[in-house]
Amino acid sequence: MAAGIVFSLLSAIVLNTGNIVQKHAVSPLPEISAHRSAHLFGTLVSSRIWLIGLALCVLGVAFQVMAFALAPIPVVQSIFNAGLVLLIVLSRVRLGERFHRNEWFGLAIVVIALISLGASLTGSTSTIGLGGSAWRILIAAVPTLLAVLLVVAGIRSGWGRSGFLYGIAAGVLYGMAALGTKGASTLVVGHGLISSIPSILTSVYPYVFLVFSALGMIAYQIGIQRFRIAIVGSMSDVVASTYIVVVGMVVFGESLPKDPVTLTLRLVGFTGVLIGAVLVALGGGQSAAPMPPIDSDLGLGSVLIAEADLLVGHPIEEVVAGNHPAPSSDNG
């Protein structure tokens, strides 16, 4: 498990460094929106700095694959969330984002939670889940897309003015992408690092990762261009971690430690990291001059939104706002 922890730390450091580089790159770029996907990607790839950040993120994902192969999901995600500290520090040092009292308090909780998590690793008998299947992951994709639809509807209704909804949307999508990463790690365990490459490429895992990572990247890049990365990035990390732990443990058949003391320390550690990250994400309020959500932001799920509007018979954001009842599930 020690090697898995090392890879988790490397993944956290490299990915969050890449996120900071991307934030630095997108801030001065022309306004991007998901509605104009070609313009969005063209704008991003025109920036060498953004491409460097992307390369760091890809390397971080490679480290994450190895971490999932060598350690249980809750351990990997809790250690990965330690990168939140690096994200906040770099956002202050490199981007000049100011800290608030609740953010410092949240960071303190994260540190204490990591100590609890570290104590839970001594003599742990947690299993590394290898029982996932392509069908389980594809089934998990359905409620994931529905959840993203609701978040996008919330943004359309004007609830995304502090940036946290962009972080939630990105986190749900990145969490689903992480299931593809975890799935690839099971093949690495079964066939070896090099020998597993053909099996990975012929499986559904890399394509689940690519599709949901691309959608998550759209939400994330728009969010960090308009709002503080401390808010969008923290919320994205919290939601993605919660998703992969809750859904991933079911999909891949992982179990928690049976010893009550170890189990308590593990749960306190993971919960503490989440609470601390939420305080960081919400503690600073919105940025001094955020770029407000615009109609073109709705393109994140434009096709899915149109289908949902057709199914419910009303614009889905009106259903979310309570102006129309949700459709009944009774087919009779």
Image (tube, grey):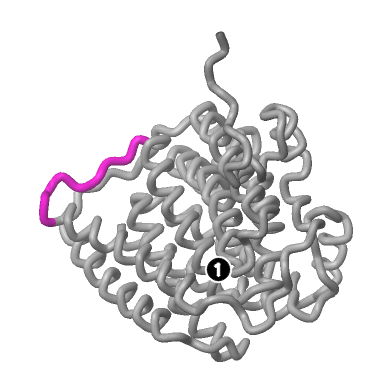
Q: Position of residue 228 (x, y in %)?
A: 60, 76
- Report the front residue among 294 and 71: 294
Q: Position of residue 67 (x, y in %)?
A: 43, 56
Residue furthest to the front in view is 323
Amino acid tagged 1: Gly
Quarter of the figure that contains the C terminus: top right
Q: Position of residue 93 (x, y in %)?
A: 55, 91
Does 104 sit left or right of 234 as displayed?
left
Does 255 sit left or right of 242 as displayed?
left
- Numbered-mark total: 1
Does 74 sit left or right of 193 as displayed?
left
Q: Image quadrant of residue 326?
A: top right
Say if residue 89 shows up in the picture.
yes
Q: What residue sits 45% from the left and 48% below the top? A: 243
What secondary structure do most residues of the magenta stretch adopt?
Answer: loop
- Report the front residue among 148 and 107: 148
Q: What residue sits 52% from the left and 50% below the top? A: 175
Q: Secondary structure at mark 1?
A: helix
- Magenta residue span: 253-261
- Report the front residue among 6 and 96: 96
Q: Position of residue 226 (x, y in %)?
A: 70, 72
Instruction: Provide the residue designation for mark 1.
Output: 233
Bin the neighbour count of mark 1 within 10 Å (Cα to Cα): few under 14, some 14-19, many 20 and up: many
